[in-house]
Amino acid sequence: MITTLFYILSAFTLATAFLTIFSKNPIHSAIYLVLCFFSIAGHYLMFNAQFLAIVHIIVYSGAIMILMLFTIMLMNLNKEDEKNKTLWSRLAAVISFCLVALVLLAAFIKAQQTGYTYEVSGEDYQSIKVLGQVLLNDYMVPFEFASVLLLVSMIGAVLLSKKEHINN
Amino acid sequence: MENILQEIGIDNYIYLSALLFCVGAFGVLYRRNAIVMFMSIEIMLNAVNLLLVAFSTYHQDAAGQVFVFFSMAVAAAEVAVGLAILVAVYRNISNIDIDNLKKLKG
């Protein structure tokens, strides 16, 4: 049951990722990317990491995709007028994709795991309570730096996309 | 759902993440539209996040999931700044085809 669910979700994730790349229209790419993110949130739910799944949906499918769709509409890109790359560079992309996938998969399939065997200890390690304690005790400094990073990126985005008046 | 890794195995998640990462890298190489290249970068980031969560469950340690939170924060910041740069580029050359960004070549 769980195995079947895993294979269906994985196939859906990979298919929507491919469709994101092969769609001519950037809006369709964005829609397929939302579906891909939802299926990855489904994977998180299968790991029983509910809080992470909710945060993933809010951040990616909510914030990031809205930002991308706004940019696409701002630039009026919702038409299929993109010229393809040359045949040679597309062929090179396909060949390098196949080679990278082959090397990675071959390396991971041949790899033997040693030393650690997975067994369920029944300990609670991924509820919101435990995650909050780990985040605010052990990772306090990175947490604060993340807030600085978000502030700086917000200011940077506003500055970069503001209209410039350098000429006069 | 408690023992999902006993049912499926960590190796299937490794293969899925490797394939998803390759798909993202392929998208960066294949497309000319800068926004779709951004989406491919997001796919790569998500592949890595998925593997982090899988290993967090495998070792039953919350640190992996906390790291995914930080990775999401960095991804959000990256997308905001990157799209602002794209808007600035679009103002200058009125498209975002990366093959037109050759001014530095001289």
Image: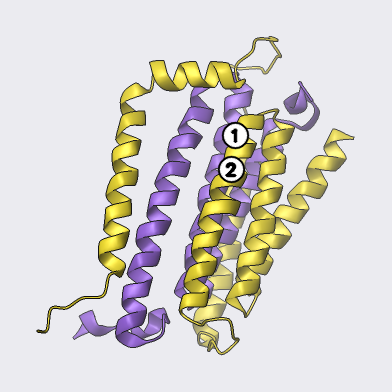
Chain colours: A yellow, B purple
Residue at the spot 63% in from the left edge and 38% down from the top edge = A54
Q: Amino acid at mark 2?
A: His
Q: Amino acid at mark 1?
A: Leu
Q: Are marks 1 and 2 in contact (CB under 8 Å)?
A: yes
Q: Nearer the viewer, residue B97 or A152?
A: A152
Position of B39 with respect to B6 (left or right) is: left
Marks 1/2: CA distance? 6 Å
The residue under label 2 is A56
Vertical relation: A93 (above or below) B17: below
Position of A28 with respect to A156 (left or right) is: right
Picture coordinates of residue B62, whole percent (x, y): 53, 21
Picture coordinates of residue B5, whole percent (x, y): 73, 27
Q: Nearer the viewer, residue A129 or B14?
A: A129
As helix, strand or loop, the secondary structure at mark 1 comes to: helix
| Res B79 quadrant in image | bottom left
Picture coordinates of residue B58, whole percent (x, y): 63, 24
Q: Subunit of mark 1?
A: A
| Res A81 quadrant in image | bottom right
Q: Are marks 1 and 2 on the same chain?
A: yes
Q: Subunit of mark 2?
A: A
Residue at the spot 34% in from the left edge and 45% down from the top edge = A150
Residue at the spot 80% in from the left edge and 28% down from the top edge = B7
Vertical relation: A63 (above or below) A41: below
Tell me the crowding category of disc 1: few under 14, some 14 to 19, or many 20 or more residues within 10 angstroms, Cα based: many
Task: Work out which residue is located at the far right of the displayed protein and give it.
Answer: A1
The residue under label 1 is A52
Q: Nearer the viewer, residue A23 or A66?
A: A66
Q: Nearer the viewer, residue B24 or A164?
A: A164
